Image: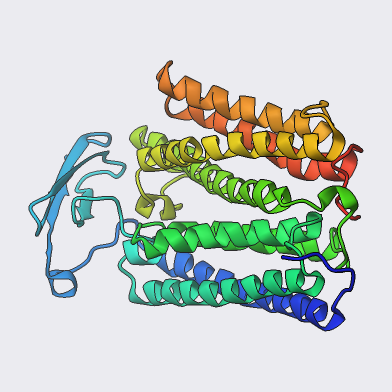
């Protein structure tokens, strides 16, 4: 985009209206996802009949009289795959475990996994609303940039809008690639709403031209990659949190504990993918985006030399970007060399994301430095 001195107030106003409209649609999508999760949580283990699926073979295993006896359930799929589940009976005499599946993790989303038609319909409506919200959201970002004829991420308000869009877009791309990630819909939409809410209330800045230091092609390169990395790190963060919850639930069930927030009443945990699935997903996302985060820091250093005459001055933003890089490097190194998996690796991943989050909000708002372009 070419720089211009004027600001188009009509486009700026249209951008604001599109962002607010996107927030309304995202809110509707959030409620639809909540309906999906609520209806999908009925019943400890949902059963799909042969008439509904036409491709599933069901196995019913009845536990012995003694509580705590191991029960093995084998599920055969039409495609030849099988799944073997071993559970500890948590009831008394005559406890029955019923399951059905296709030899893979549960299908995408609590509604689909729970085989409840109403919940599944609500989930599909939620996805459609999310797509509509993303289109409005993208329009708000584009018109914001057109209003000042520049890339629309020159302050924290604009960056937050773009960051929220990156999270949503990444989720929709995974869905389009036919990945079973509809369970990501609720946390993604909720996080997007919170990010936009903070952006429009606390971080909002009128559409205006950039300070001279930001008049550079590196704005499109450096900030764009930072936005993409932020969205990816957030997706990995959600996967990590769900891993910890699912892992805790599985351990409590194996120990026969039926009370507490993760007890049998929390049946939603039963239909989420396996804990190891979340663990691997978090690792793969972080491993994939780490080289791009490295490039983001290098691009920032090159831009700093062009703008200020030095590649690195240990500015607070530079320092915390490096700390974040070290934190994720430690996580990936521990996974690759020390063989850390599971909870220890998850805690490292959470610490790394906390560094990224402080680098974005904490440094920009509370710390003064050469990167103080928050506009608030």
Residue situated furthest top in the rendering: 338
Q: Is residue 221 left or right of residue 198?
A: left
The scheme the figure's colours follow is rainbow
Q: Is residue 146 above or below residue 101?
A: below
Q: In the rendered image, is residue 98 in sight?
A: yes
Q: Is residue 293 above or below residue 336?
A: below
Question: Residue at 49% of width from left, 45% of height from top?
Answer: 239
Q: Is residue 360 above or below residue 134?
A: above
Q: Nearest the camera: 21 or 270?
A: 21
Q: Is residue 117 left or right of residue 299?
A: left
The image position of residue 79, as x and y in percent, is: 10, 57
On the rendered image, what quadrant is the N terminus found in?
Answer: bottom right
The image position of residue 351, as x and y in percent, is: 63, 31
Q: In the rendered image, is residue 31 in sight?
A: no
When asked about the image quadrant of residue 86, the answer is top left
Q: Nearest the camera: 99 or 278?
A: 278
Total numbered labels placed on residues in the image: 0
The image position of residue 242, as x and y in percent, is: 49, 45
Q: Nearest the camera: 71 or 94?
A: 71
Question: Residue at 73% of width from left, 76% of height from top?
Answer: 20
The image position of residue 143, as x and y in percent, is: 72, 75
When asked about the image quadrant of residue 362, the answer is top right
When asked about the image quadrant of residue 153, the answer is bottom right
């Amino acid at each position: 985009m070419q720089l211009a001195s004027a600001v188009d107030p009509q486009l700026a106003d249209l951008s604001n209206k599109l962002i607010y409209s996107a927030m309304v649609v995202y809110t509707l999508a959030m409620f639809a996802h909540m309906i999906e999760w609520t209806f999908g949580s009925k019943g400890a283990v949902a059963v799909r009949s042969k008439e509904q699926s036409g491709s599933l073979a069901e196995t019913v295993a009845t536990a012995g009289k003694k509580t705590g006896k191991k029960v093995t359930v084998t599920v055969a799929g039409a495609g030849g795959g099988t799944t073997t589940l071993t559970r500890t009976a948590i009831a008394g005499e005559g406890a029955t475990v019923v399951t059905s599946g296709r030899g893979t993790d549960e299908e995408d989303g609590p509604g689909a996994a729970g085989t409840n038609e109403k919940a599944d319909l609500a989930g599909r409506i939620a996805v459609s609303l999310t797509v509509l919200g993303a289109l409005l959201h993208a329009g708000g970002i584009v018109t914001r940039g057109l209003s000042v004829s520049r890339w629309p991420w020159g302050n924290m308000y604009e960056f937050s809008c773009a960051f929220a869009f990156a999270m949503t877009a990444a989720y929709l791309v995974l869905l389009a690639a036919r990945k079973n990630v509809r369970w990501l819909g609720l946390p993604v939409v909720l996080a997007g709403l919170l990010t936009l809410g903070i952006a429009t209330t606390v971080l909002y800045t009128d559409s205006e031209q950039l300070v001279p230091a930001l008049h550079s092609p590196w704005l499109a390169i450096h900030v764009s990659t930072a936005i993409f990395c932020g969205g990816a790190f957030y997706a990995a963060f959600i996967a990590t949190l769900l891993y910890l919850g699912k892992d805790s639930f599985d351990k409590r069930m194996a120990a026969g504990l039926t009370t507490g927030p993760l007890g049998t009443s929390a049946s939603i945990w039963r239909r989420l993918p396996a804990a190891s699935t979340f663990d691997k997903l978090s690792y793969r996302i972080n491993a994939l985006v780490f080289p791009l985060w490295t490039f983001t820091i290098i691009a920032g250093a090159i831009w700093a030399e062009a703008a200020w005459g030095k590649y690195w001055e240990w500015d607070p933003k530079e320092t915390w970007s490096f700390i974040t890089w070290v934190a994720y490097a430690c996580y990936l190194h521990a996974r690759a060399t020390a063989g850390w998996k599971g909870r220890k690796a998850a805690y490292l991943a959470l610490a790394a994301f906390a560094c990224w989050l402080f680098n974005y909000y904490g440094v920009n708002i509370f710390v003064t430095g050469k990167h103080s372009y928050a506009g608030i």
